[in-house]
Amino acid sequence: MLVSALSSSIFFIVMDQPRRGNEVRVTKAMFEQASGLTLGFGNAGSLLGVVALCVFAAQMAQEYSLGTMRNLLVRQPRRITLLVGKYLSMASFAALIVVVSAVVSVATSYIGANAKHVDTALWSTSAAYHSLALTFINVLIATLGYGTIGIFLGILLRSPISSISIGLAWLLVVEGIMAAVVSSTREWLPGQLLSIIAAGGDSLVSYSRALTTALVFLAFALVASGSLFKRRDVSA
Amino acid sequence: MPVPATSAISVSGLTKKYGDRVVVDHLTFSVPQGSVCGFVGPNGAGKTTTIRMLLGLISTTDGHGEVLGKPLTHPEKYLSRVGAMIEGPAFYPYLSGRENLKVLATLGGFSHSRIDELLDRVDLLDRGSSKFKSYSLGMKQRLGIAAALLPQPELLILDEPTNGLDPSGIHEIRTLLRALADDGITVFVSSHLLIELEQISDHLVILNEGKLLFAGETNHLLEAQLASIVARTEREADLTRLAALVGALGHDCHIEGQTLHVFAPVDWAAELNRVAFNAGIVLAGLSTSRPSLEDTFFEMIGGAA
């Protein structure tokens, strides 16, 4: 909730601020479009994704560090069934946080619009609702994508601290640096692609390109997770 | 090795290697249904690795086996009838004892209606709503046993179930395991408390350095060991003479203080009495003691008692 409120608020704070460097300028006119309702929410996608990565990775890895994995596997020895169940439960949690974020973001947007005297007439049109629905789906895809990476790291590393720290270091720091130095890498880096999906595409990478490439990465992550989980000895 | 028709566990050539390190080396044994089988070995002998292979948690390098008549390669075919506690209790610290059991019951498809009964059985009913992290070691251990009993198992596999329990708790577990076996449940229990295992185990499997040293009935193992017959003569001077007589008859013996210790079958005590009488030696005391499982175990692994 805090992430969404913060993300939406910041956009109103920087609205109509003079352009600096390569920063995207957020204008009042942009907010007064039908899509203005979802500006903050769409850009909260990456932050929600980070939360999802941490939760999914910790949830998975902690089963090993606590030793509870052996209890779970004795009660449900069909490992893929167990993994799918855990994934679905975490995906449900991810969907819930996206729903809550959407509600908070929309509420914050109305509060910010009122404070900044933004005309919200177009926010209650079918185009706005369509934009909200699309943004919700994109943020959900991105959040689940980050979560899937988290599960893969949790199974691979079997330590909450390692899986979260390595995941965040790669996605936030390494990818950030690579994308800043060589912008074309944004077409191939999974974290960058998921952020682009959450925002509905950008000027460098189209939405469809980002979605297709990200799905390939996520398919690999799911297959690798399933394979590792099924075959690996559980000595914890 | 012939496999009894009614074995709860039977393994043949079971092996586990990590690289070049052989942790379990061609184990072959069977555990009869309805028995209490003690699983004994020093630290690092391969007991927990063997148990993990039986439960499908780790793969086997070689060999095969069956649990409750189903192959080890398909744990999903038998684990619903198995209860287990391996290497200490592992639960979610921020859930209560009751909630932890509910998680496992839901996962295994078991009714929640027995949970309070199980908590009561392990004397945790009044603490069932407390968070697991607030439990003492003994309480955690008892919750682990309750979780193992969730599926109303035909086979119970317990790894050091009495860890952290006080003497009354150990006694309760011993009574519980015996009662379960009397109800037809097979109990496969590893423990370092050899005195306890000796009291409850019908069968034993003894490992050392991954290798099988013994698998069979506890009585057979102990009866095969020579007893210690302790004789005290009326006159101390006769001890040496009696020792010489015993030695001439082919039995090992030695003098300790004012007693003669003879290593022979228990029923040789009567013969010793006769030998002493015929030699004009009056015995002031004659007793027998069979080696304990602990003595036998240490003798088998070559360690000091």
Image (tube, rainbow, N blue to C red):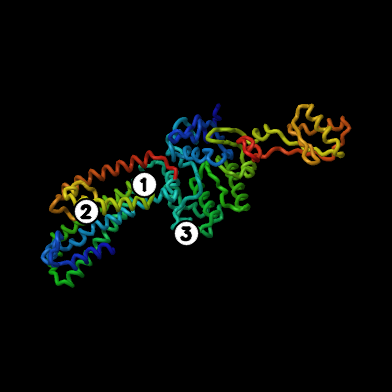
Q: Position of residue B258 (x, y in %)?
A: 81, 41
Q: Nearer the viewer, residue A180 or A94?
A: A180
Residue highlighted by disc 1: A157
Residue at the spot 48% in from the left edge and 56% down from the top edge: B97
**Chain letter of the residue carrying label 3:** B
Disc 3 marks a residue whose amino acid type is Lys
In this rendering, the label closer to the viewer, 3 or 2: 2
Indicate the secondary structure of the residue bearing disc 1. Answer: helix
- The residue depicted at 44 percent of the width and 58 percent of the height is B94
Residues under numbered marks 3 and 1 in contact, where contact means CB atoms less than 8 Å apart: no
Q: Are marks 3 and 2 on the same chain?
A: no
In this rendering, the label closer to the viewer, 1 or 2:
1
Horizontally, residue A225 falls left or right of residue B166, namely left
- In the picture, measured across the screen, residue A51 lies left or right of residue B231, that is left
Q: Residue furthest front?
A: A181
Answer few, some or many: residues within 10 Å of disc 3's Cα (few below 14, many 20 plus, some between 14 and 19).
Answer: some
Q: Quadrant of residue A107?
A: bottom left
Q: Residues within 10 Å of mark 2 (few under 14, many from 20)?
A: many
The chain containing the residue under callout 1 comes to A
Looking at the rendered structure, the kind of residue marked 2 is Ser
Q: Which residue is mark 3?
A: B131
Which is nearer the eye, B246 or A90?
Answer: B246
| Quadrant position of the N terminus of chain B in the picture | top right
**Amino acid on which the number 1 mark rests in the picture:** Leu
In the rendered image, is residue A223 in sight?
Answer: yes
Q: Where does the image place residue B185, in percent across and percent down from the top left?
A: 55, 41
| Badge 2: chain ID | A
Disc 3 to disc 2: CB gap under 8 Å: no
Instruction: Identify the secondary structure beneath mark 3.
Output: loop
